[in-house]
Amino acid sequence: MAMTLTEFTRSLDPKMLPRILQIQSGFYCQGAVYELFGRECCLSTGDLMKIIDISITRFIAQTADASEIKLPLEYPGLFRIVSDSQPYLTIKEIVDSLKISSHRLGQPAFISANQIQLPQGSVKEKEGFCITAVTLDAQGGGHVDCELLYKEPKFSFRLDLSQEGHFTECEDDQFYTLRELAEWKIPKGRKRTVTVANAPPPKDMLFSTLLENISGELTLTPVYELQAVMQLRKSVALIPSNMDVEVMDVTEQFDVNTFIQPLSLQDVFQKPSEIFPMVADVIERPLIERHMPEDFVSLLRSEQVIIHRVYEAKRILATEIRQESPRHFLIPATYKGRLKRRPREFPTAYDLERARSDTEQLHVVATRGFDSTYSGLASVLVGDEFVVKKSKSGEVVCDGNRDLVDALTCMKIKGKTHEPVRIPMCLDGGFMEVIHDKRQYSISEVCHWFPLPFNVKVSVRDLSLKEDILASVPGLRIEEEITDPYLLISTLDLSSWWEVPVNRTHMIVHLEKSWTGGVPTSNVNSAIEEISEDSYYTMRRYVFTTVMPPPRPPKKPKQPPARPARPQPNPRPEKPTNIPASCSPKSPRPAVVSRDSSTDRSHSTVRTERTPKSPATLPKPVLQKAVTRGHSLEDVCINLPDEDDPHDYEYIDEDQLDNIRKQFHEQSISVPAKGKPSNTI
């Protein structure tokens, strides 16, 4: 039965590929152009083509006001999925609609509206579960493997494809790129609704205006493209799904093997290792990057190559130390350059604990001060030097209350002496590493001896490379050791051998015949790859999905609650007397003193409250160290904050203001000597 190519695309199940189609009504492009920009533009009636793949090339996003926006897959923004309210009535309907695999993005989560009885228990009503794998049998049946969400220990169970119910998608709080949505999250025969979570920056002139001033939900409609092999051609044709032709599925009438079988490098990697080495015809060559070595470029431009074996090789992921647009590299473990250490920066005390090593002492200098609110835990001044020891929990005293706090034990360097101190783990400061080690290391030694991430600089370039692109980089942050799939490929004369990355090389080949020649006669070359930002974040996000993330750094401890103030007969206290005019508020409202430890305690911030609180509802104040010798009383005269202000403020009545004046007057009698720091109350 003939159908339009659009209708065939909508009904196509990618699991049933390849399919052979016969053109029933041809399409002719004016000017007799057979191929334009890699897309097929002329299909004659009676032509046969084998559909080998289907992919989404772009999305059409429809807004609430029915306007349409074309979004390419390269759009750098992030999106959040709006869960589909239309339920699935059987497990088989879920399997037919969504792509399910062992990949973390291929494990959809659902809520069952009804309780499901299991041999080992039950899935309760409104309890969420995710589908982790699908198993099909020859009779058309099968089952899915599932896990309950947020259940410890894990509870796994199986459901038959025939299981009926009322299954709706769980709320998804993850962010996705358009490419990830296209690959994993577009259900067959359903619409996908999303919201914009993160738009590209304004400096991105190419994409920043696409969704400018767009808010609310977007309905995504995918635009597909078919990859096909023509009967009399080796190259792969790219056919838009909306081409105006009629086709008929004749897969049962023709032998699929009469067509060539073009394979991507990912397809080749999935082949059994026993079939290699193989001679392969290069059907589609990859793009040549400017930083690629000349020998590697000549290999990629060959019409025929030998694929010797497939394997996973170790690579070191590194990033250039630079503020704007840092480059990312994949460095082979065989890199022969020598590296010197560069100082690391640590934004918090918790990062010092993570970077601490048993093989050497961590010596740092403070680049930002911090005032400790606990008795027994040290404050930090800019320029203080510490040698980090270990972390330990212990009791400390704050405002007369004992509390259990995690602290980092350090040795504070004072000239030639070391003083043991304890720094709170919640310290929000800054530290810079002091380097004493002048030795040179190989990259494998850095990964083996030091905790990652680790900062280095190339001191001696790799002399085996014609051009070492790392030698000109001012600094590198060694981040991860990863394993990545590679093919060992050589030219037919065996003069050049290279490891070719599978996931970042777009090459289409056709396996021609087995190779019975010799083994490598020269060294296998491994190129330093400069990878894109998308590839970098993909690796950082998915390569180590089995590794548990580090615990969250401890939060800054909350101040103990103050006792409520005694009720006052006058709900709005009058303006205090004997206060300088310069610090008098515009309206007779009570004064407050901020207790925010991140600000300078010798200077308070002026705020005005829109609706003053009654003194009976305000807590009794605990006088902070806000008055410094050498400062005037105006420094602590401030107004009430807004009720929505996140800072914690203390109420001060007239009696406390009198106490402040007395203390200020007593301390102003003896002013400290010039050049010495003043003590606070």
Image: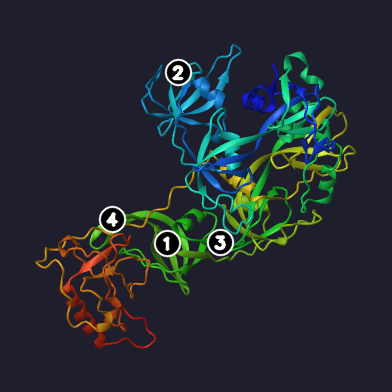
Q: Residues within 10 Å of mark 4 (few under 14, many from 20)?
A: some
Residue depicted at x 67% and y 43%: 314
- Label 1 sits on residue: 428
Contact flag, marks 2 and 1 (Cβ < 8 Å): no
Please report contact status of discs 4 and 3: CB closer than 8 Å, yes or no: no
Is residue 533 placed above or below 60 in the rendered structure? below
Give amino acid for label 4. Answer: Asp
Q: Nearer the viewer, residue 526 or 258?
A: 258
Report x, y in % for residue 158: 48, 20
Q: Nearer the viewer, mark 3 or mark 1?
A: 1
Q: Residue lying farthest left?
A: 569
Q: Quadrant of residue 643?
A: bottom left
- The residue pinned by badge 4 equals 403
**Amino acid at pointer 2:** Glu
In the rendered image, which residue does mark 2 sit on?
164
N-term mark: 2 or 3? 2
Report the Cα–Cα distance between label 2 and label 3: 57 Å
